[in-house]
Amino acid sequence: QQQVKQSPQSLIVQKGGISIINCAYENTAFDYFPWYQQFPGKGPALLIAIRPDVSEKKEGRFTISFNKSAKQFSLHIMDSQPGDSATYFCAASTRGATNKLIFGTGTLLAVQP
Amino acid sequence: DAGITQSPRHKVTETGTPVTLRCHQTENHRYMYWYRQDPGHGLRLIHYSYGVKDTDKGEVSDGYSVSRSKTEDFLLTLESATSSQTSVYFCAISEPPGRLSYEQYFGPGTRLTVT
């Protein structure tokens, strides 16, 4: 049972364009929503995270938009660069006592020069 | 990789053999996690530890056991490896929820192939 659904599976964007990756969740108890970036042969690295008390968080070219009523959140990468080419994972957790993360299935982003 | 090492980094083993993967951290974080990564599934939690000798199951724990005798080390054991356990295994660490920073930091991974 997949609690966090991520789309698209893969994405091709031209340099300078906007990359958008979407996630939807089912469990209304989730209260922490991070995005991870993973390069080939490396472990995932935290990119940006949001809590449900805000609708948007921006860090540099990366923005999370959060829609609590729709149970959806998305990652926007502005001015996409070839160096952004990686796999992106959304995740969710109930911080509670264990901080267990439930991950989406990942999006392979390719930014063409 | 936030002071996290995993060993071995690559391993090929035969079906039915026992395998132990090691995660070592130098951050003194209380929580440690083992995930497996497979195409089409993202990362799935196998087991986690919330303190020395305190462990619990994740969503895909069947066929795996863990042990944590020291804060810095978290071992994942496949008692009798099967081909379905061919995967990339990641260790992660975090501070407990409630701390200002409780993000999970991941190690470099172990690629395990069971033939």
Image (spheres, coloured by chain):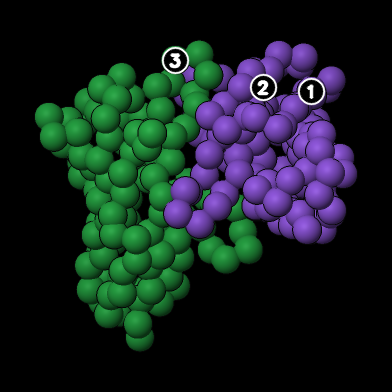
Chain colours: A green, B purple
For the point 70% across and 32% down, which residue is it? Answer: B63
For disc 2, the neighbor class at 10 Å (few under 14, some 14 to 19, many from 20) is: many
Position of B24 relative to B89 (above/below): above
| Furthest-left residue in this view | A69
Instruction: Report the residue marked by disc 1.
Output: B68
Q: Are marks 1 and 2 in contact (CB under 8 Å)?
A: yes
B84 left or right of A57 in image: right
Q: The numbered mark 2 sits on a residue in which chain?
A: B
| Residue beneath disc 2 | B49
Task: Determine if marks 1 and 2 fall on one subunit.
Answer: yes
- Tell me where residue B87 appears, x and y as whole percent: 65, 52
- Dot 1 or dot 2: first in sequence order is 2
Counting from the top left corner in percent of width and height, residue B86 is at 68, 52
Quadrant of the image for the C terminus of chain A? bottom left
Q: Is residue A25 visible?
A: yes
**Helix, strand or loop status at disc 1:** strand
Q: Provide the secondary structure element on which disc 3 rests.
A: loop
Q: Looking at the rendered structure, which numbered label has been put on residue B59?
A: none
- Say which residue appears at 23% left-offset and 73% top-offset: A17
Q: Say left or right for B33 vs B25.
A: left
Q: Is residue A80 above or below residue B52?
A: below
The percent coordinates of residue A74 (x first, y second) are 24, 48
Q: Amino acid at mark 1?
A: Arg
Residue A13 drawn above or below residue B35: below
- Whether residues under marks 1 and 3 lie with C-beta atoms below 8 angstroms apart, the answer is no
Residue sitting at 83 percent across and 22 percent down? B70
Give the percent coordinates (x, y) of residue A48: 38, 45
Amino acid tagged 2: Ser
